[in-house]
Image: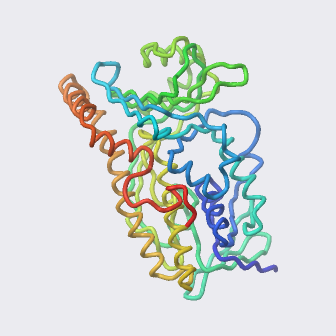
Amino acid sequence: MSIEQHDIIIIGGGLAGLTQAAALAAHGISCAIIDRADPAALLKPGFDGRTFAVSSSSVAMYEAIGLGDALAGKGCPITKIHVSDGLKRGNLDFVPASDDGFLGQMFESRVLREAIYTHITKQELITLHMPAQITAKHRGPDGVSVTLDNGTELRARLLVVAEGRQSATRDEAGIRFAHWQYDHNALVGAITHERPHGHIAYEIFYAAGPFAVLPMLDNSQGRHRSAIVWSVPRADAPAYLKLSKRAFAAEMEKAMGGMLGKVEMATDLMSYPLGFHHCAKITAERIVLVGDTAHGIHPIAGQGLNLGLRDVAALTEVLVDGARLGLDYGDAQLLDRYSRWRSVDTLMVVTASDTVNRVFAIPGKTASAVRRFGMGLIQRSGPVKSLLMAEARGEAGALPKLLEGVAV
């Protein structure tokens, strides 16, 4: 049996786990990443329709930890967010000042994963165990250990859990969470369209569920592309999936009011159930939660990944500061600081996303009129719009240094 010693062990090789390792390694902290998935399966060629909205502050963090060149030119900038209650009048537009840059960028899932994974493989301070199965875990006063199915034992001072929503490690640690399922499925895919999107992200709220149209880079043939996330009642999802691509495209054209002209499906359609979960407690003895392991929200505002990246930035700063003071990475003081730092921001975002979803789901002309009146007030209120725009960019609250584009 071989033994490996690291500063940190990260369980989960998704975007949050990989980014966490990259951020820590950039500050001289060694990590081991464990995941059951084969990287080759996640990085296989071709576009499957999955995309991520990465806020401008998250992009700044990637640049600060050495991924700027790898991601340059691979995301489509979002320069405006257009919100509407159906196709009625009374819209709400978020547009940054001319010198403030973009609100975020849309990345294809595979492109983003590949850039981060390739960067990870070049870092001497990061060891990958992918694919690998965990056969045993131990946490104690002096550290943590994880045993793999090949007999290798990993030892470290702290365990970072980035396994996703269905985290066995979180459950084994006795960390409880509030959760519920929405009566909706998200239909996810990508389209090509006749008219250019102008780098505008559209969020169209219908009583049956929100419909997001998100700008992407043109394809290699120069055709305009966008990603779609359409929330539909769960009972209706199977019927949508049975439609031909042409019939589904016609439904989307109708839902978009023809704003992008003729629409065609660029990928197969995927569907997944929508749910909510939130851990009131995100630490335990020598263990911390980041990303979807700690919180899962409705994709209504595209903030799921960014919320996890804010966890990554905060945890990195806490651990680096602790190391400079000579503290153990698993010191209870450091874990408490991370927990307090993230608890308020996370609670505000998850509560806001759930509330907005429920408010726009209220049917009827009166409810619609009230919503449009409220959007009109916000549209005319500079300070309120600025606050909401800062939240969309991931720049609200006490920001970790990495989200300002500065190394810790």
Q: Residue at x 52, y 49 (%)?
A: 305
| Up/down of 372 relative to 259, above or below | below
Q: Quadrant of residue 72?
A: top right
Counting from the top left corner in percent of width and height, residue 379 is at 28, 31
Residue drawn 46% across and 15% down?
259
Indicate the position of residue 158 as horizontal and vertical percent values. Answer: 58, 76
Does residue 185 sit above or below 352 in this rendering?
A: above
Answer with the quarter of the image where residue 341 lies. Answer: bottom left
Q: Residue at x 34, y 22 (%)?
A: 86
Residue in the picture at 43% in, 46% down: 275
- Seen as rendered, the residue at the extreme right is 1
Whether residue 378 is situated above or below residue 343 in the rendered picture: above
Left or right: 43 in relation to 65: right
Where residue 368 sits, quadrant-wise, is: top left
Q: Quadrant of the C terminus?
A: bottom right
Which quadrant does the N terminus fall into? bottom right
Q: Hey, which residue is sitting farthest front in the picture?
A: 99
Residue 405 vs residue 98: left or right?
right
In x, y percent, where is residue 313? 52, 61
Foreground pick, 184 / 281 = 281
Q: Is residue 336 above or below residue 233?
A: below
Q: Is residue 320 left or right of residue 69?
A: left
* Colour setup of the view: rainbow
Query: Residue 151 location, x and y as percent?
Result: 78, 75
Task: Pick whichever, 333 or 99, lies toward us.
Answer: 99
| Number of marks in picture | 0
